Structures are given as structure tokens and as C-alpha cells.
Image: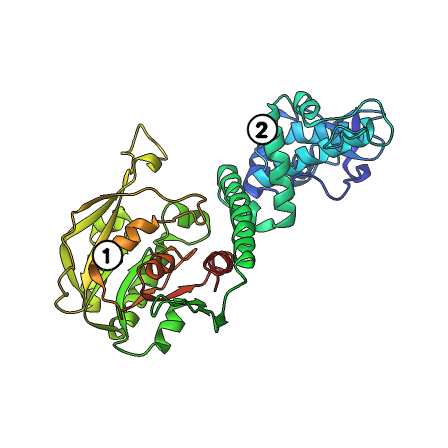
Amino acid sequence: MKIKLSDITILPDRQRPVFDDDYISELSESMRLIGLIHPIVVDEQGLVAGECRIRAARLLGWTEIDATLRSDLSPWEREFIELEENIRRQDLPYGADVIGKKRIHKLLQEEHGATHPLGISIRGRKSNWRVADTALHLGISVGATSQDIQLADAIEKNPELGKLKSKVAATNALKRQHQLNMHLIMSALDHQKRGGVVKTKGTKIKDEKRGNITLIYADAREYVKTITDLSIGCLLTDPPWGVLFDSEYGLDEKEGLPLMTEVLQLLYPKLTIGSLCWMFCATKHLITGAIYRILLNAGYRVYPQLVLWCKPTIAHASHPYREIKGDYEPIIVFSKGEGRDFLEPIFSLQEFIVEKPKLHVAQKPVALLEKLINISTNEYDLIIDPFCGSGRTLKAARNCGRDSLGIEIEEESYKIAKIDLGV
């Protein structure tokens, strides 16, 4: 049947939130050349599926379009047809995809009756609808359906989660958040059980003479300017270089190097003469010489050897048949002036395992950080980490009886570090 475009009602709150203009243009060209292959779908309420085709038809100046009329569709059937059409025509953003599946699940539960978590019948209905039943309707596994519904819940509460680069990145972020929530609850209970902690301006006071932590929520570029010159005895940090995990969270590679250039220049006068510095590096920037140039231009002395953190259990490769799996992470060693002697010999290869639960996507083993601190600092050295994340450097410094200063600009990481460290 033919239907006038002006007669079609497009209801609000449809699954696809945005439309790709290039795709609509290509679709209109295809429709101009060979006509409309698949009619749109409508029912008594209005459009069910085919909004991209309607937009393309309007571009062509059409006044009417082929349509299939469906009668007496239930709410979940309307959602299912729209989702199926969207998936087949052009990939939905993963956020819209999982939210669409959740909406179908809820509508099916409303129609058939939900299943109580304890197995109790809801609304007195005999037939109770489970995730497994929705999975059967969607033609995907129960595990994938459950995961998508959980991700949809999380995206609705925190829309930023739906802006990550991929569904895998969003799912991993959600898993980490679940682990963090449990860890933070346990940490809070533990602090409460021990009677709380003494706090003074973000610093936790220990019983020992040393080991105080100062945690600052700020931009390192601004806060470092306020630090007294010649007051820092050691720099130990893992900067956001804008590669791999950093890029998933919005930091571009073009931002990472300028950021480190500025921070390293600002830190130079704050360090004591002879202080040793340790910085985890992006291998690609080492190979191009970018990091060496930044350090040398800022006035640092760069050591000719690297320390390599061996991490075979968490090796990364996005394309394992086209690139070498990264089962190590380089740590560049540099100093202000002629570096002081190490307090004990150190080999280039270090193998340590990251502790569980993992509080940050780029978390480093506390034991490795403790080793670097112990061989390069004295009792009264202040250790700084201007990109402290979840605060592992600060925790290692406290374990070694050293005072530390951590700066973090990302609010979630700052809150995690604050609770976990008890500051």
C-alpha cells in the first residue's frame, strides 16, 4: 500500500537517537536509482520501523511511500520490530541497542508478569517472564541478554558510560565499577570498624613518624605551581599518554604529550638536586623519541637503561595476528642533575602482579612501586605523583614510611583513592 508522508505519525522516544546524514544521503541515492526495496512498517499509532527511509524519501521530494500495515501490535512487538529493523539496516549505537533490548524485556514482563528475584509470582500471574524468555525472543544467549540489560540500566543512570568508544569498553567499565563498589564498601566498613581515621586537609596522619598522604583534587598543571621549590625528593608516576585505555576515556594522543611537556617543566624547579624520577611510558612514544626529547628539553638527565615491568598475565594486543602482544611496560628513569646512587642494585626486568580488586584501568602493582621507592628515596623525601589515579603510588609510599603528594583531576578516581586510602 502507498501512504502519504504527511500522514505518517512518528512517535517520540524512538530507539535510534541520532541519524547519520551521510547514510541518509546514500540511502536516498539508492532509492532514487532502484526504488524502495523494503516498505516501511506502520500500525494504527503511526510509524513502527523505517524512519531512515522516510528521511531519505523527503530528501528526494517524494510525497508518498510504500508501507506495510500491521494491526494490533503489542507494545513489545512494536519495540522488537523497530530493533530488528535498526540492527539489519545500520548498526545502532551500542547504548541505544542495549536500551532497546531492556525496553522489550520490560514490556514482555508487563504482558506476561515479571519473575520476582526469589521466585515469587508477581501480580498473581501464573506465567512469569524471565531474562531467558527475552533472550529466546531476541535470538541471543541468556548471558548476553542479561549483560545488555545491566549495561542499559547503567547507561540510563550514567549517560557518560554510553559515550565510550565501544560496547566492550562500556561493559568493562561497568564490571570495574561493580568491583570498585564492593571494594569501597569493604574499605569503608574496615575504617569504621577501626574507629575511623584522623583527617586534616586531605591528609591522613599515621602513628609512625612518616608516611603521611596528601591527596589533591586538581589539575596538576595548576597545583604544581603552588609547590615550594626544591621540596620534592622523588617523582613516580604513570601519566595519561592518550593511548589504549586513555583514549577510551576521552584523552586524545595529541593531548598527552603536550600535557606531560608542561607538567615536567613545571616540576623541574620543585625537585631536589639529585632526585631520582620514575615514569611509566607508552612504548610508541619511546620508539619515536618523543619522551626523550621532552625530558631533555626540560633539563633532566635521562638514564641510558630502562626498567621493564613484565606482565605476561595481562598482555594486550588489539590485533594479535598483526601486532606483538605487549607483555611488558617500560619505565624510564631520569634525574635532576647527577642522580643520587641507588640504595641497592636493581635489574632491568621486574615481574609483579597487579593486586585485586583492580581500582583503576591502568593500575600498577603496589609491590613494584614500593621497590622503586625503597631504592631511590630516603626517609624524609617527599614523593609526588601528579597523575595518581586510584592512589597506588601513595599507598606504596605510606607502606615505605614516606610522605607523599598525589594529584588527580578525574573525579571518580579521586573519590576512589580518597576512600581506599582513608584520607
Of label 2 and label 1, which has the lower sequence position? 2
Going by the numbered disc 1, the residue's amino acid type is Ile
Q: Does any portion of residue 316 appear in the rendered image?
A: no
As drawn, the label of residue 107 is none
In what quadrant of the picture does the N terminus appear? top right
Tell me the quarter of the picture where residue 403 sits.
Answer: bottom left
Q: Residue furthest right?
A: 124
What colour scheme was applied to this rendering of the protein? rainbow
Q: Is residue 206 above or below residue 279?
A: below
Residue behind mark 2: 144
Q: In x, y percent, where is residue 142?
A: 62, 25
Going by the numbered disc 2, the residue's amino acid type is Ala
Q: Is residue 411 above or below residue 152?
A: below
* Residue depicted at 29% across the width and 60% down the height: 236
Q: In x, y percent, where is residue 186?
A: 54, 50
Tell me the quarter of the picture where residue 409 sits.
Answer: bottom left
Q: Is residue 388 above or below residue 273?
A: above
Query: Dot 1 lies on which element?
Result: helix
User: Dot 2: few (<14), some (14–19), or many (≥20) neighbours within 10 Å?
Assistant: few
* Residue depicted at 32% across the width and 63% down the height: 401
Residue behind mark 1: 291
